[in-house]
């Protein structure tokens, strides 16, 4: 009796398991024209053969912190419709805003431990800044797909659980004028490796003012 039940359970689980093993994984390794890995590169994959699956509630949550008078992360992709929270981890106040086409908002002065949020429901690039600290910058890329990620210091970003098929792979970095786009075909059950070489503009990012620790303004 017990065995029968287990056999039935296995039969029931089998389709879910096979779906998992036939999914594709993509691993993007990005370098600049000098061969150095590109950190903080946002990539996303839009399916070309079928519509993207609808979002789950868990997918529609993201956080951009203000910590040590910087935004963290510097670049992030979120799915269209995501509620992005902006918690302030600093004792000083920040004033987060965006004047972008997909989203214009302003979160007036908010102090330590206060969290404000914005729902981003239009795809596109949403640069955000702080009215008080000019060097604070972050870039939110709002995409209409569940498959996206950001590269680490080694220039690598992996995205798993994609159905096999054709995708538009887009890559964007704040030091690029426009996103790099290419079509790729992903095979089931395989790790699909893609190498991308991109030309980046010089790094003009202004880092946090060295005076911190002194004045709080
Ligand atoms: Cu600030």
Image (tube, grey):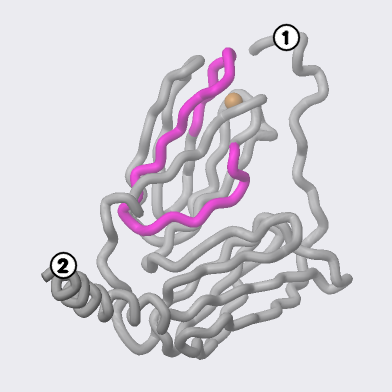
Tag on residue 215?
A: 1
Measuring from the top left, give residue 90's x and y in whole percent: 58, 19
Q: Mark 2 falls on what kind of element?
A: helix
Marks 1/2: CA–CA distance: 70 Å
Quick one: 103 or 138, which is closer to the camera? 138
Tag on residue 163?
A: none
Measuring from the top left, give residue 217's x and y in whole percent: 64, 12
Range of magenta residues: 72-96
What residue does disc 2 label? 2
User: Which residue in the rendered view is the most extreme toward the top?
Assistant: 215
Which residue corresponds to the image point at 37% horizontal and 34% vertical from the top-left? 117
Q: Where is residue 51, by image quadrant?
A: bottom left
Looking at the rendering, the quadrant in which ligand 1 lies is top right
Measuring from the top left, give residue 100's x and y in whole percent: 47, 50
Which residue corresponds to the image point at 80% horizontal and 69% vertical from the top-left? 32
Give yes or no for contact between labels 1 and 2 (Cβ–Cβ under 8 Å). Answer: no
Task: Give the class, few, some or many, for how many residues have Cα within 10 Å of label 1's Cα (few <14, many ≥20).
Answer: few
Q: Is residue 193 left or right of residue 61?
A: right
User: Which residue in the rendered view is the most extreme toward the front?
Assistant: 1
Q: Is residue 22 left or right of residue 27?
A: left
Q: Eyeballing the image, is 92 above or below 81? A: above
Q: Quadrant of the N terminus?
A: bottom left
Task: Give the class, few, some or many, for how many residues have Cα within 10 Å of label 2's Cα (few <14, many ≥20).
Answer: few
Which residue corresponds to the image point at 38% horizontal and 75% vertical from the top-left? 20
User: Which residue in the rendered view is the most extreme toward the left?
Assistant: 1
Q: Main secondary structure of the magenta part?
A: strand
Measuring from the top left, give residue 47's x and y in whole percent: 40, 81
* Closer to viewer: mark 1 or mark 2: 2
């Amino acid at each position: 009796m017990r065995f029968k039940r287990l056999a039935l359970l296995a039969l029931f689980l089998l389709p879910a398991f096979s779906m998992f093993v036939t999914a594709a994984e993509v691993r993007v390794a990005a370098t600049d024209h000098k061969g150095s890995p590109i950190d903080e590169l946002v990539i996303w994959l839009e399916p070309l053969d079928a519509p993207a699956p609808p979002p789950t509630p868990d997918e529609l949550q993201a956080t951009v912190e203000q910590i040590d008078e910087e935004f963290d992360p510097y670049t992030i992709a979120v799915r269209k419709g995501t509620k992005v929270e902006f918690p302030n981890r600093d004792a000083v106040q920040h004033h987060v805003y965006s004047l972008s086409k997909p989203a214009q908002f302003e979160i007036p002065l908010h102090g330590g431990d206060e969290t404000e949020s914005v729902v981003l429901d239009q795809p596109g690039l949403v640069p955000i800044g702080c009215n008080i600290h000019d060097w604070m910058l972050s870039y939110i890329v709002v995409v209409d797909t569940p498959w996206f990620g950001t590269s680490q210091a080694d220039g690598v970003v992996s995205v798993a659980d994609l159905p096999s098929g054709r995708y538009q792979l887009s890559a964007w970095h704040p030091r690029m004028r426009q996103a790099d786009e290419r079509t790729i075909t992903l095979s089931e059950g395989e790790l699909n490796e893609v190498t991308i070489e991109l030309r980046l503009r010089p790094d003009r990012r202004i880092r946090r003012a060295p005076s911190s620790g002194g004045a709080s303004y």
